[in-house]
Image: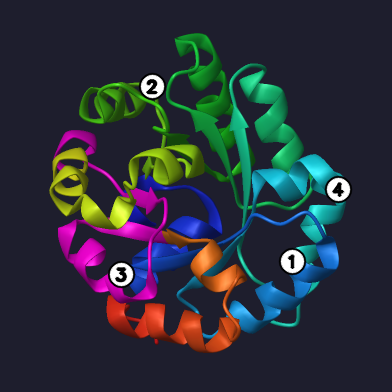
Amino acid sequence: MAKNIPGPLGERLEECGTLLQVALDLTRLDDALRIGYDSLVSPAVILEAGTPLIKTVGLREASLLRALPQSPLLVADTKTFDTGRLEVELAASHGFHAASVLALAPEETIREAAEAAEEKGITLYGDLIGHPDPVEGAKRLRSLGVHVALLHIGIDVQRKLGLTAGQLPELITRIREAFQGPVAVAGGVKPGETGVLARAGAGIIIIGSAITKSPNPRKTAEEAVRNMRPRCI
């Protein structure tokens, strides 16, 4: 498994080298199922039950994404800030292969989440959204047992500042060096940027609205995968 990442997601990352994670930040399960189905164009594509979807329908219904014919790997974007063990165990019990904890959460919460992820055999993302120093934040995540460091530019920041993750390849490289493990990147990423981000060191490239709002999600996902050049096309 890639860099000791537990579970199927680690195995897939090792197989493919780079993964495209489609963030289904939607509020209707039928839309998530339809777009998720269309997005699964390669073994290098995994699906994310976005926070809006989880808050609207809950983990139980969001986990129905696993019933798609392609049997996708599934990430629960829980953005946990407290009760780390409970929320990771809930994600695992509903069949998710990964969950997320906020890098700004208390040390105790992150440790509990990491320990639960190891015990349940799923992957834990540490979400650096809002962190004043993402490089130092990545070092802290590594020391606390998190498996993937996620550089995440939130939607409000994108809208107010015009900043997206696709503009930050140098920061991705610095986080990769600091974390010494897989780095994910999210926040306004476009399909044409996946190659640059992969070369900068991103192992998991997350795209949301560029795919979910596309008139042709399948074609857009194909473009993103083609540009990032995974080993498992």
Image position of 68 (left or right of 179): right
Q: Give above or below for 75 relative to 211.
A: above
Location of mark 4 (residue): 57
Q: What's the distance in space between the residues labelled 1 and 3, CA to CA?
A: 22 Å
Q: Which residue is pictured at 23% across the width and 54% down the height? A: 167
Q: What element carries label 1?
A: helix
Q: Which of marks 1 and 4 is nearer the N terminus?
A: 1
Reading the image, the residue beneath label 3 is 194
* Mark with earlier residue (1, 3): 1
Q: Are marks 2 and 3 in contact (CB under 8 Å)?
A: no
Indicate yes or no whether the magenta region holds residue 183: yes
Highlighted magenta segment, given as a residue range: 177-205
Q: For the residues marked 1 and 4, what is the alpha-carbon distance in whole angstroms?
A: 11 Å
- The label number, if any, that marks residue 32 in the structure image: 1
Residue 90 visible in the displayed image? yes
The three-letter amino acid code for the residue at tag 2 is: Leu
Estimate the spatial distance between the alpha carbons at disc 2 and disc 3, rounded to whole Å: 29 Å
Q: What element carries label 2?
A: loop
Read off the residue under disc 2. Answer: 144
Report if the CB atoms under discs 4 and 2 are less than 8 Å apart. no
Residue 114 percent location from the top left of the image: 51, 28
The disc, 3 or 4, on the residue closer to the chain's N-terminal end is: 4
Q: Which amino acid does label 3 sit on?
A: Thr
Q: Is residue 217 above or below residue 74?
A: below
**Badge 4: how crowded within 10 Å, few (<14), some, or many (20+)?**
some
Mark closer to the chain start, 4 or 2: 4
**Where 205 falls versus 133 (above or below)?**
below
- How far is mark 4 from mark 2, CA to CA? 31 Å
Label 4 element class: helix
Question: 34 and 121: which one is in front?
Answer: 34
Q: Do the residues labelled 3 and 4 touch (CB within 8 Å)?
A: no
Amino acid carrying mark 4 in the image: Val
